Amino acid sequence: MDIKKMEQYASQTRRDIVRMVAAVSSGHPGGSLGCADFFTVMYHKILKQDPKNFTMDGEGEDLFFLSNGHISPVWYSALARANYFPVEELATFRKLNSRLQGHPSVDHDLPGIRAASGSLGQGLSMGIGAAQAKKLNNDDRYVYVLMGDGELQEGQIWEAAMYAAAKGVDNLIATVDYNGRQIDGDVEDVLSLGNLKNKWQAFGWETLEVDGHNMEELISTYEEAQSLCGQGKPVMVLMKTEMGQGVDYMTGTHKWHGSAPNTEQLESALNQLEMTLGDY
């Protein structure tokens, strides 16, 4: 898929996000909007996957784990638009008995989801376990994990970081959504992360940086990350994004981390986001 087509997918994903959370007056649009370009690149360019024949083991496929599960709207949209399940099912987001719960769940067998998430700090550990299982099974595919930057304030992340480097888990590519904001305010004010690149390098990881809204750069960076695998070190990508990207009033603030737009705000957002693939 070329860049122009992926940009169309990303725009539609952003429309999906704001419509989903507005419909139920609940959800997390800010970080979801900020990661729309990343998920588009992942599911239409980077991941080796088989949506029509989804299995929990994912043998011979790349695996993806979302640690900051509250940005489920962007993941659900990406999965639906990549043909894991019908796009129309997005209309059930956060409703009773829906497969599309507020945080990803495995109890309703939703294709694309291999682990429940949302309890912050746990996704990297799950990804490491899956990556080691692939090694034991002589499966040469990769495991990808996405985390939030505020999530790095959880101690389990750094235990996992030490473990992955010490055990040479070199089929693992992790990403931090580095938007600088969390539910309580700016990350720098809540608990500064310091120099993240130096930190991950000191923990023994190959560390790359990328503009999370530049699709060409995203593609080249993750191709580089793949080339670094198999050399004894896990790989970390620090991805700079803007929370609320694509909707002007949602950027520059942490307010929309976990707040849904009202009817008028939704209309404003949709006016800024081109409908490219058709709304569900």
Image (tube, rainbow, N blue to C red):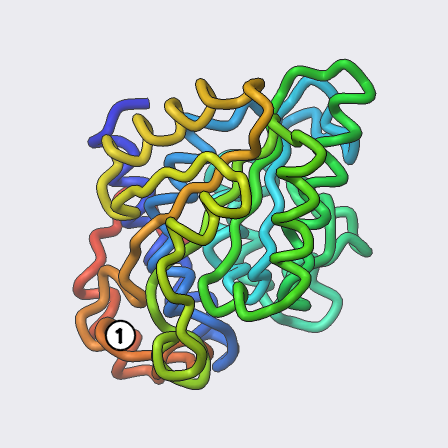
Q: Looking at the image, which is closer to me, 138 or 90?
A: 138
- Local secondary structure at mark 1: helix
Is 275 on the left-hand or right-hand side of 93? Answer: left
Tell me the residue that label 1 is attached to: 250
**Neighbour tally class for label 1: few under 14, some 14-19, many 20 plus, Cα within 10 Å:** many
x and y percentages locating residue 179 in the rendered image: 33, 63
Is 149 on the left-hand or right-hand side of 180? Answer: right
Q: Quadrant of residue 243?
A: bottom left
x and y percentages locating residue 261 in the rendered image: 36, 80
Tell me: residue 49, above or below residue 87: above
x and y percentages locating residue 269 in the rendered image: 24, 69
Q: Looking at the image, which is closer to me, 20 or 7?
A: 7
Q: Quadrant of residue 180?
A: bottom left
Is 50 on the left-hand or right-hand side of 250? Answer: right
x and y percentages locating residue 119 in the rendered image: 68, 68
Query: Residue placed at 23% from the left, 60% from the top?
Result: 246
Is residue 123 at least partly visible in the picture? yes
